[in-house]
């Protein structure tokens, strides 16, 4: 049967992280691996009340098919929500998606013929790599600096891709508290990106799963809010601000583009769950999502601070070790000396009963073997301190080049 | 921005039915158009009880991300369910999907390079046409007879496609109470299809949304139950037997194929909603889905009978008019004299305040302009009688070739 598969299947790789994540779920292991929101933050009481009312009293809508574009009350609520951020859309500029991973799939379907070039930072979100690779795009990596993508390098990469026969189509960015690094783009870089997109006639896909989870520092406008040409498509998800298990998100952007996205979505899943759409819509209309997000920020800020403090305390003070200090989101990023192979080190870490995610899969150019991502959202404060203490010892051992047989 | 779209977008057509369906939803119109289950059949009391318990007491699972393959209890319940039909699968042969439209999208991604041939009956399910066209497959139509696909024509079509440089990949079938015709394949045709698939090295995709909704006649085994070579992939959905708004389905088949499907699904939506999966799993584990389906059959059988009786009574007795008498499912299919254009006639029907779905979009070869699909599941018995009475008059007027100015 192998001979019947499409070319894209032969190239596709299932995430190498999956097996590693399974290992990290063994009992006794403190895991900073999976990028999971803290389930204690899910507003379960309210969600349960809404769900029961929707199922009992609105079953003709909540349990039936709905339109491909999505429920109008939910789109209306999202329009108001995005307007708080300077983003102004009409109803036909918003489509509900089965979370933002579907948004990425629809972007890939809408834009990529095989070999078309998409520009992504090094590192970038793994789900975007998978979605774009599945539709056979040429993934071009561009270095990520402390204040956003290296825009000179982006321009060079575009020229090189074009010269190599790859049609440049879009730039994918996560400008706020990026997964995996936690890095946020400066205002200047956001403007610079739009200038390049205009010059090169590219679409910008702005993925904003963590945008509202800012704990410190100053507000930056979304790239889309600075866009005067209608080149930016934004991806929103409820996964980090309400509940990941709903699988609910949205895309917004230029009308003619959303129209194409809707056509592709119709072929992909007809419509997103009416029930989860109704639940989210009523949460937004009858409760205060902004207040809920403020509570989330207080909750996660403490965890981020705890992890940063533990890193200061327990990580070896050696050359080549550094980490980001994100102003929001769920992740921070550790760079180790070039000689360290994080995948090898993970095996040692699991012996020490602590887990992280290796950084390499987030790089489309095969680099990043000496990096790792730490997620601070799900572990308790005690686990954060103890887990980073263990991790510090792992790094120490790794640096010493000593094999360990010590089972903790 | 048009120049940036992928080729598939330029070829993709949004369903022509959408606009027509919108017209059919105007107040006062009796609609046999949308293929919607009757919302009164959704077991809302039980679903509400489960939902509230899952959200309040199992939120760490029901509101969190889950695996791409899907929740194990749901897959286990589905394995038992499919076994009733002679279908035997292990856990790693089943993947939960965001309803069966996603199954079709994943099939398309897994098998089709542009121009690869898929064989589908004339007519066939519109959602499959859209999913396969979106991934740029070559859609090859094969006549559908009263007892299933014309298998001689299938063999010829395969040869012709191969000669024309299209690589034959798979045959898509809905062997039980097909959408749109209501036709069920004979046992012999099911076996014949497998013989051809073996000889030609093709995969068979067996879509079974209506299979359990049999009202009369004798049980036929699924094609997959006759498959000794592991060539059949089955698509199941909860949309017609539990609630469409959950957007929940499954695929089952050979292990190595499901493995590829899971890889593609990971890139497509990471995972299907944990909440809807948990709700369906508990419904299956704690309640009796078979008993529920028996109630559905009693409910829909009466509606089917009412529609068949009304057609006998009200449709003109003219040459060239015929309709199917399905033993299950939600649809029946009316063929009108060749000269009738159903799309034109629909405008007249809407004036008479009755709606149907035109048949042409279900044909990949552009034929079928004189056909229409009638859905009997959602209208009340009174609406069925009155709607078919109106439709009979519409057809009569159409046949008489008379313009009507009569507004009812």
Image (tube, coloured by chain):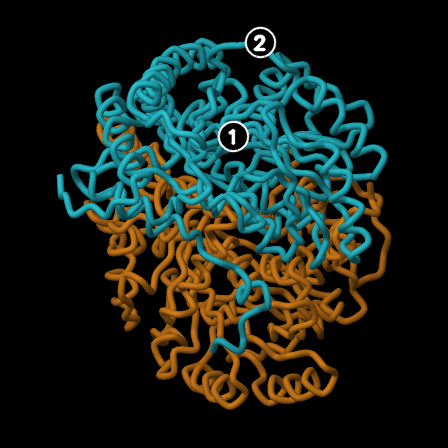
Chain colours: A cyan, B orange
The label nearer to you, 1 versus 2, is: 2
Q: Position of residue A315 (x, y in %)?
A: 32, 26
Looking at the picture, tell me which residue is in the foreground, B123 or A379: A379
Residue under label 2, please give it.
A218
**Dot 2, how many residues are within 10 Å of its Cα: few (below 14), some (14-19), or many (20+)?**
few
Which chain letter matches label 1?
A: A
Q: Position of residue B119 (x, y in %)?
A: 61, 75
Quick check: A263 left or right of A4? right
Q: Determine whether label 1 and label 2 are within 8 Å by CB.
A: no
Quick check: B257 left or right of B390? left
Residue A150 visible (yes or no): yes
Q: For the residue labelled by badge 1, is the local secondary structure a helix, a strand or a loop? A: strand
Looking at the picture, tell me which residue is in the foreground, A193 or B241: A193
First along the sequence among labels 1 and 2:
2
Looking at the picture, tell me which residue is in the foreground, A350 or A95: A350
Q: Is residue B112 above or below residue B54?
A: below
Which of the image's four quarters has the N terminus of chain B?
top right
Q: Is residue A148 above or below residue A357?
A: above
Q: For the residue labelled by badge 2, is the local secondary structure a helix, a strand or a loop? A: loop
- At a point 68% along the width and 17% down the height, the residue shown is A187
- At a point 46% along the width and 50% down the height, the residue shown is B266
Which chain letter matches label 2?
A: A
Residue B38 visible (yes or no): no
Residue under label 1, please give it.
A237
Q: Position of residue B109 (x, y in %)?
A: 57, 61
How far, Cα to Cα, is label 1 from label 2? 22 Å
Which of the image's four quarters has the C terminus of chain B?
top right
């Amino acid at each position: 049967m192998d001979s019947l598969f499409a070319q894209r299947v032969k190239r596709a790789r299932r995430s190498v992280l999956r097996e590693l994540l399974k290992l990290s779920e063994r009992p006794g292991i403190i895991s900073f691996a999976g990028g999971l929101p803290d389930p204690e933050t899910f507003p379960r009481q309210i969600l349960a009340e809404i769900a029961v009312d929707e199922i009992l009293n609105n079953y003709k809508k909540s349990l039936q098919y709905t339109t491909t574009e999505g429920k109008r009350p939910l789109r209306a609520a999202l329009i108001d929500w995005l307007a708080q951020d300077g983003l102004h859309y009409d109803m036909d500029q918003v489509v509900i998606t089965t979370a933002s991973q579907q948004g990425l799939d629809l972007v890939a379907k809408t834009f990529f013929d095989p070999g078309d070039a998409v520009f992504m930072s090094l590192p970038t979100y793994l789900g975007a790599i998978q979605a774009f690779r599945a539709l056979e795009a040429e993934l071009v990596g561009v270095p990520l600096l402390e204040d956003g993508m290296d825009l000179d390098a982006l321009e060079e990469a575009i020229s090189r891709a074009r010269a190599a026969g790859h049609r440049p189509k879009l730039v994918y960015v996560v400008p706020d508290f990026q997964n995996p690094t936690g890095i946020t783009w400066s205002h200047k870089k956001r403007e610079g990106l739009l200038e390049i997109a205009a010059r090169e006639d590219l679409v910008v896909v702005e993925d904003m799963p963590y945008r509202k989870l800012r704990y410190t520092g100053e507000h930056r406008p979304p790239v889309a809010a600075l866009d005067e040409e209608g080149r930016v498509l934004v991806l929103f998800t409820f996964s980090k601000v309400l509940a990941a298990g709903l699988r609910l998100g949205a895309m917004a952007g230029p009308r003619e583009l959303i129209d194409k996205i809707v056509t592709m979505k119709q072929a992909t899943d007809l419509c997103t769950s009416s029930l989860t759409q109704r639940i989210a819509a009523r949460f937004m209309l009858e409760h205060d999502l902004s207040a809920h997000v403020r509570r989330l920020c207080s909750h996660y800020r403490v965890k981020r601070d705890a992890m940063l403090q533990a890193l200061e305390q327990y990580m070896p003070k050696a050359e080549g070790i550094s980490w980001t200090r994100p102003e929001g989101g769920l992740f921070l990023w550790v760079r180790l000396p070039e000689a360290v192979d994080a995948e090898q080190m993970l095996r040692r870490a699991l012996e020490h009963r602590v887990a992280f995610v290796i950084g390499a899969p987030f790089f489309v150019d095969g680099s990043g073997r000496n990096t790792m991502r730490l997620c601070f959202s799900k572990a308790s404060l005690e686990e954060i301190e103890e887990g980073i203490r263990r991790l510090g010892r792992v790094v120490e051992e790794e640096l010493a080049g000593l094999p360990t047989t010590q089972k903790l």
